[in-house]
Image: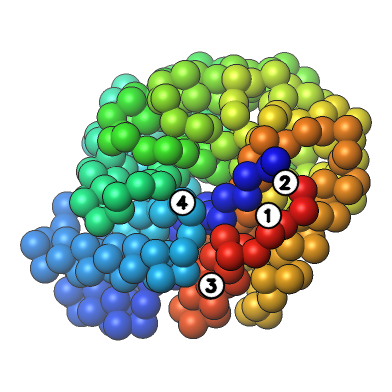
Amino acid sequence: MTEIVATTPGLYPLPDWAKEQLKNQKGNQKADLISGDESEEIEQSYEDVRTEFIDAQQAASLDRIVEGQGRWDDMLAHPLAVNDAVDTQGIVRYYDNNNFYRDPVVTGDLEATGDVANELEAAAEQVEEGLQAVLPGPYSLADLATDEHYGDDAAFQAAIADFLADEADLLPDVETLFLLEPSLVENAPGEGADERASDAIDTVAAATDAEVVVHPYWGALEEKVYAHVMDADIDALGFDLISDHEQNVYNAQEYGTPDDVALGIVDGQNTLVEEPETIEERIEWFTDQTQQNDYERIYATTNTETFYLPVNRFEEKLEALGALNKTEVKA
């Protein structure tokens, strides 16, 4: 019997009240220009945001609860943006979306800050079970950053992997860790770099006892990249069935999957809210297409972050995912 686990990859949209409040608290700066040294009132605002995110997930009966990453104004680059060895410079486009982050330029030896762990510690006070951590994957974080210290791509990626492993080691007790790896799709590693990307994922995964889910999105992995990611010691691999269902199914058919998979079957960027029955049909379609694979667990999730959605649509999508808990799904 396959276990269906309703969850998300985090990075939720800030409520309107929080956007306005934080803008005022930061002296009318853009909300994404955060130094990491917040005042007490800014910290309180983010705590209130976290509580709202957790309440929404619990009300929707999700099986895994994320912190929501309300402070991650620099998107996946956030763990570097708050690091003393990083100079956060000019605004750059976040992949091909109309969202932006500050370019994290690494200028010294990276050491873990415990910033993400602190957020999870706070979330753990409100979540009795099912807590899920979210980190950028090592390949994506290295891709989004600029190196002015380590000297070459291989050394830089290894340093990023070690940094994330140290951050993961500081996390409180969580059931699942989602490593978000859109760059594996958006800027696929070439020959040699694909194997290094797999090794980097191994480094991070080895640092935690949690179930590790590598979640690429905005398309499907190239075949060689897929094969190398399959070599990594991970518990589950993600498939963005919204952006490219055909190639993702082909990869699963041709190269197999881990025992667990994460299926991106709710659109994290489109305001159209899927019915629970539609989500169930998408799960069944994937399992029918990949009958040679015997899945122990399927994480049913949005394909991307929901940062781009209006808050009301975001909450409705949480409710649609949570409704899967009350419905028998054939898998």
Question: Which marked residue is nearer to the observer: mark 4 or mark 2?
Answer: 4
Q: Are marks 1 and 2 in contact (CB under 8 Å)?
A: yes
Residue at horizontal 53%, vertical 72%? 319
Question: Where does the image place residue 2, in percent across and percent down from the top left?
Answer: 69, 42
Residue linked to disc 4:
64
Name which residue type carries label 3.
Answer: Glu
Residue at horizontal 24%, vertical 73%? 22
Residue at horizontal 54%, vertical 65%? 322
Q: Is residue 222 left or right of residue 327?
A: right
Quadrant location of residue 82?
top left
Whether residue 317 appears in this view of the structure is yes
- Who comes first in sequence, dot 2 or dot 3? 2
Residue at horizontal 88%, vertical 39%? 291
**Inter-mark Cα distance, 4 to 2:** 18 Å
- Who comes first in sequence, dot 3 or dot 1? 1
Q: Are marks 2 and 3 in contact (CB under 8 Å)?
A: no
Question: Which marked residue is nearer to the observer: mark 3 or mark 1?
Answer: 3
**Inter-mark Cα distance, 1 to 2:** 6 Å
**Inter-mark Cα distance, 3 to 1:** 16 Å
**Inter-mark Cα distance, 1 to 4:** 15 Å
Name which residue type carries label 1.
Answer: Gly
Residue linked to disc 1:
264
**Inter-mark Cα distance, 2 to 3:** 21 Å
Q: Residues within 10 Å of mark 4 (few under 14, many from 20)?
A: many
* 6 to 203, vertically: above or below: below
Q: Which mark is residue 319?
A: 3
Residue linked to disc 2:
239
Quadrant location of residue 48?
bottom left
Question: Which marked residue is nearer to the observer: mark 1 or mark 4?
Answer: 4
Q: Residues within 10 Å of mark 1 (few under 14, many from 20)?
A: many
